[in-house]
């Protein structure tokens, strides 16, 4: 008994119950558990070692751990704010959990993670697009925009996009299936966003460079340099965004299979498939569409590169001006040093002769005042120039 009491501090209660059963052969499990309860105290052992109901024939016991875990995951799943656009331009907004959304779309959970900053992928006859903060899923029947909250997208989403999808905008893919219009609308919006950033930065950078390189100003304004540094940083971020956009489109253009996968209606509608096989090649139309926006992105990249070259050239001019000012200051410092050395040399000669030669002026008050004033004047001039 003493050993069991010492083991009760180290072993769990289920293990003690098993030990009690082993120590009492021939006894029923309930009796053995009763002994363990007597040793440990009824308040501790009773919940685990109470009498069990005998099993009934045909009764099955199943663990519900998977159901409980699924219910727990569903309760903490993220909720998407979804804006749905159909072919006629009708708009509906609703909230849906991520688990319900990817199950309805026939996708996997990893498809809606949007891990990459810029991506255009296809999965199960669905197009999944992300352009930084813009997340979209395109189906043959509708366009879904996910999580536009706290973003300045309301004007484009609810005023421009519905008319574009319904065929009332300035898109060139109206005769083609719905996914062509959706892709073109999203690409057009992103190109317009990049163009807007460049149009804001370009005049600011040119104005700052003109003020810094102006020959009328002999010194460089540090506030202008700070503004140029900030604008240069913003320009670098814009160049990175354009580069990622170009690379994402170029990856699709290099693979013919991905171009075929972007043509959703071709594989879901037999009539469209027959038309595509007869003469209208949807993959070729998709390639032309992507190439068009790739060229637009290339033009933006060239404009940003020209601004970067202007900044580098202006920095070279600024450094040349600073070097010229530095050379002027060094030359002035050399001249002052030589002048001070000459005055000191002449003063040394005067001191040497004045201490060794005698004349009738040593006792004259006028000569003393003249020498004192002259020495004070030389010292003042030297200090002033230094």
Image: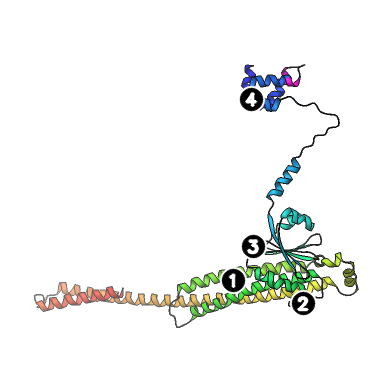
Q: Which residue is drawn at 51% across and 72% down?
A: 227
Visible residue check, residue 119: no
Quadrant location of residue 94?
Answer: bottom right
The Cα–Cα distance between marks 2 and 3, rounded to whole angstroms, is 30 Å
> Which of disc 4 and disc 2 is earlier in sequence?
4
All told, the count of numbered labels is: 4
Cα distance in 3D space between marks 1 and 4: 72 Å
> Which residue is depicted at the point 56% across and 68% down?
233
Check disc 1 and report the residue beneath it: 235
Residue annotated with mark 3: 149
Looking at the rendered image, the disc whose residue lies closer to the viewer, 3 or 1, is 3
- The residue at the point 61 percent across, 21 percent down is 6
N-terminal of the pair, mark 4 or mark 3, is: 4
State the extent of the magenta-drawn residues as a range. Answer: 21-30
Quadrant of the rendered image containing residue 338: bottom left
Give the spatial CA distance, label 4 vs label 3.
55 Å
Residue 351 screen position, x and y as percent: 19, 73
Which badge, 2 or 1, comes first in the chain's sequence?
Answer: 2
Q: Where is residue 139 in the image (x, y as percent from the top left)?
A: 79, 64
Q: Is mark 4 on a helix, strand or loop?
A: helix
Residue identified by numbered label 4: 43
């Amino acid at each position: 008994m003493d050993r069991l009491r010492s083991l009760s501090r180290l072993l769990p209660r289920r293990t003690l119950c098993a030990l009690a059963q082993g120590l009492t052969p021939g006894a029923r499990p309930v009796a053995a558990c009763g002994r363990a309860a007597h040793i440990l105290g009824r308040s501790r052992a009773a919940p685990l070692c109470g009498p069990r109901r005998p099993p009934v024939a045909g009764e099955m016991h199943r663990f519900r751990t998977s159901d409980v875990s699924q219910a727990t995951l569903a309760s903490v799943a993220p909720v998407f704010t979804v804006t749905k656009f159909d072919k006629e331009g009708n708009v509906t907004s609703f909230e849906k959990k991520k688990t319900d959304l990817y199950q309805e779309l026939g996708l996997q959970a990893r498809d809606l993670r949007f891990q990459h900053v810029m991506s255009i992928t296809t999965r199960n006859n669905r197009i999944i697009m992300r352009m930084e903060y813009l997340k979209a899923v395109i189906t043959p029947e509708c366009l879904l925009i996910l999580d536009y909250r706290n973003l300045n997208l309301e004007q484009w989403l609810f005023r421009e996009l519905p008319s574009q999808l319904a065929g009332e905008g300035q898109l060139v893919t109206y005769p083609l299936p719905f996914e062509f219009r959706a892709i073109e609308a999203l690409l057009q919006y992103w190109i317009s966003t990049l163009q807007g950033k460049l149009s804001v930065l370009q005049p600011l950078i040119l104005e700052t460079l003109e003020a810094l390189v102006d020959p009328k100003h002999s010194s460089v304004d540090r506030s202008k340099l700070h503004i140029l540094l900030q604008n240069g940083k913003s320009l670098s971020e814009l160049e990175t965004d354009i580069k990622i956009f170009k690379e994402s489109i170029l990856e699709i253009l290099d693979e013919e299979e991905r171009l075929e996968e972007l043509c959703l209606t071709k594989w879901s509608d037999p009539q469209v498939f027959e038309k595509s096989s007869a003469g209208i090649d949807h993959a070729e139309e998709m390639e032309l569409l992507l190439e068009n926006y790739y060229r637009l992105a290339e033009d933006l990249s060239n404009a940003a590169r020209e601004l970067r070259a202007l900044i580098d050239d202006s920095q070279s001019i600024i450094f040349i001006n600073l070097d010229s000012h530095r050379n002027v200051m060094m030359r002035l410092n050399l001249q002052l040093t030589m002048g001070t050395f000459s005055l000191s040399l002449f003063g040394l000669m005067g001191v040497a002769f004045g201490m060794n030669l005698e004349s009738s002026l040593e006792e004259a008050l006028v000569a003393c005042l003249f020498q004192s004033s002259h020495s004070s004047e030389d010292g003042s001039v030297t200090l002033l120039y230094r």
